[in-house]
Amino acid sequence: MSDEKKISGEVPIDDDIQASMFSELKPVPLSDAAHVRMLGRTLSRIRETSPLSFVTVRTCEGEWKEIGAGVFQKQLRESGKMNACMYRMLPGSAFPAHEHASDEECLCLEGEVSLGGIQIRAGDFHLAPKGLPHGEITTVEGCLLYIRCGAT
């Protein structure tokens, strides 16, 4: 008998008896509600301990911050490697020229925008490479942009 079993007062069960006991066990069917609850708890525990997880930011979530006259930014995700944001520019607004410390990918989701003289519309993609400055960003009708770049 192990020291642990002696201390706890447990008496070991013979392997044959234990196998016989377990062979008689039958699964108990779960109700749909119990199954959903159990699955939810299991997935929640996995998410708590897993280094990987989904990130979802709903339209009604997050905070829009005004970063310039008529230009608003909503942070979606920031990690040690990348930064993802939405930008809403009101009609007639502008953002000053600037350089990028890393490649910056831009997808126009709504409206139109001029990125340093390059006109893009909804559905268009634009890449501003690291170190290459572009001119002022302007919009006549307004726009919604998704921008992803390396963390600075």
Image: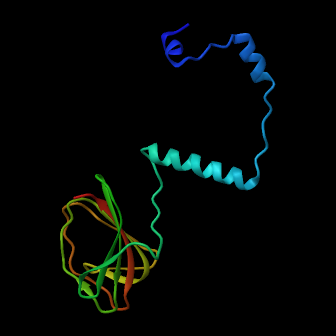
In front of the other: 131 or 72: 72
Res 84 → quadrant = bottom left
* Quadrant of the rendered image containing residue 67: bottom left
Q: Quadrant of residue 151?
A: bottom left
Which residue sits at x=63%, y=49%?
Answer: 39
Judged left or right of residue 26, residue 34 is left
Q: Nearer the viewer, residue 69 or 132?
A: 69
Please give left or right for residue 85 compared with residue 16 in the image: left
Q: Tag count in the figure?
A: 0
Q: The C terminus appears in which quarter of the rendering?
A: bottom left
Question: Is the N terminus in the top left, top right, bottom left or bottom right quadrant?
Answer: top right
Q: Position of residue 128 (x, y in %)?
A: 28, 66
- Can you give x and y, in whole percent of width and height, for residue 55 in the image? 45, 59
- Residue 31 left/right relative to 105: right
Q: Nearer the viewer, residue 88 or 56?
A: 56
| Along the viewing direction, whichever of 87 and 13 lies nearer the viewer | 13
Q: Is residue 11 above or below residue 139?
A: above
- Residue 112 lies, in percent from the top left, at 39, 84
Residue at 31% in and 80% down: 72
Vertical placement of residue 30 versus 102, above or below: above
In the image, what residue occupies the spot 75% across and 23% down?
22
Residue 63 higher or lower than 92, as above or below: above
* Residue 152 vertical placement versus 137 (above, below): above
Please state if 59 lies on the left or on the right of 77 as rendered: right
